[in-house]
Amino acid sequence: MVATGLDILLRNASSFHNRNIGLIANQTSVTSELNYSWNIMKEKGLNLRKIFSPEHGLFATEQDQIAVSSQPEMEFDVVSLYGDSAVSLLPEKALLDNIDLILFDIQDVGSRYYTYINTLALFMEAVSGMDIEIMVLDRPNPLGGSIIEGTLLDPAFHSFVGIFPIPVRHGMTAGELANLYRVVKKLDINLSVIAMEGWSRSMLFPETGLPWIPPSPNMPTFATAEVYPGMCLFEGLNVSEGRGTTTPFQLSGAPFIKPYELAGHCTGYGLEGVLFRPVWFKPTVHKFCGEVIGGIWLQVTDHSRFRSFATGVAMTAALQELYPEHLHFFKGVYEFNETLPAFDLLAGNSHIRTMILNGCDIGSIISSWHDDEAEFSEIKKGFHLYD
């Protein structure tokens, strides 16, 4: 079984007894025995002064984009880094008084738009130039460390769902991303990473031997994380991404979709490693709450051949081809950037949406980001901590 950075730190807990610690964490910050990090740190005599929680809160009690204004009653001081404004994404300087070490220990899901790594990036910027060490307790990338997908982020589309200059599926761990960000942003920080033991780049999460703990309310399983890099694009469409069901992102749909028609159209693209099953479902929250709508269930049949981002883009193109009078690209979906289409913020540029609207063939659209993938494939090698 893979040993996480947290487990390795706890083996040497005595060397941290003289440190004043802040912990960026949520409910995924557990040992291999499923004990919460903050409880074990206290048992081992560590001086944990504050816990900083990301989007969704310490125990992921809030849905996406809901400001976290209250936290469970704890014996520790818990501070939300996800309030009701962009400013609240950064820790106030006063909150860092009497802290000399920040530990980051949250399970990421391997996609650029997943906000936990973006919280790490912003925290790194906030402490740049200060006498505070940031230490990443590394955890696996559930999608492995080899396959990458999608375009590099255009700086003009920087947002809280796109901070790192990386493709959508990046194939890096949080520790590797932190090292990359320090170099790219030229940050004046004392950064260290406690690397895992037993993890290799070819591993998908089920191979790690670690238990899956849902890192957010709509990430219940590894299967969700696997399709997320592509299906999260539907947050920018008037199409349900399956929120309000037990299988978000695997399910998608809208009242105007004819499931068999859409499934057949998507199958015709010849995408590998995935089947499109026509379905009807009824979301209990979010888009089309309480309505029976038609859509697609994504079934991954080959992990090594499946390309989630390409699949999400292809499904969007199919929707535009079949239902151009019904499909809409939203603006104002993300509370900290209301001017650009949400689809573009997620994709990292406007080119993909433009190609879809112009009726470009799906092969040309997918090949449009191959150069970015090749470029980043070389860049990321310089930051690998694992073989």
Image (cartoon, helix red, strand yellow):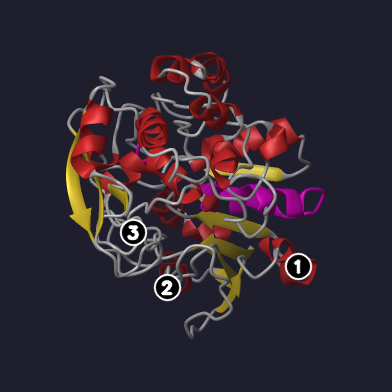
**In the depicted view, which residue is nearer to us: 161 or 78?**
161
Mark closest to the chain's N terminus, 3 or 1: 1
The quadrant where residue 259 appears: top left
26 lies above or below 71: above
Which of the image's four quarters has the C terminus?
top left
Which mark is drawn over residue 61?
A: 2
Q: Label 2 sits on what residue type? A: Thr
Q: Which residues are magenta?
A: 116-144
| Residue contact between numbered discs 3 and 1, judged by CB atoms under 8 Å | no
Mark closest to the chain's N terminus, 2 or 3: 2
User: In x, y percent, where is residue 30?
Assistant: 37, 61
Q: Is residue 328 left or right of residue 222?
A: right
User: In x, y percent, where is residue 45?
Assistant: 50, 71
**Helix, strand, or loop for circle 2?**
loop
Q: How many angstroms separate mark 2 from mark 3 (CA)? A: 11 Å
Name the residue tied to disc 1.
92
What residue do we see at 54% from left, 63% from top?
65
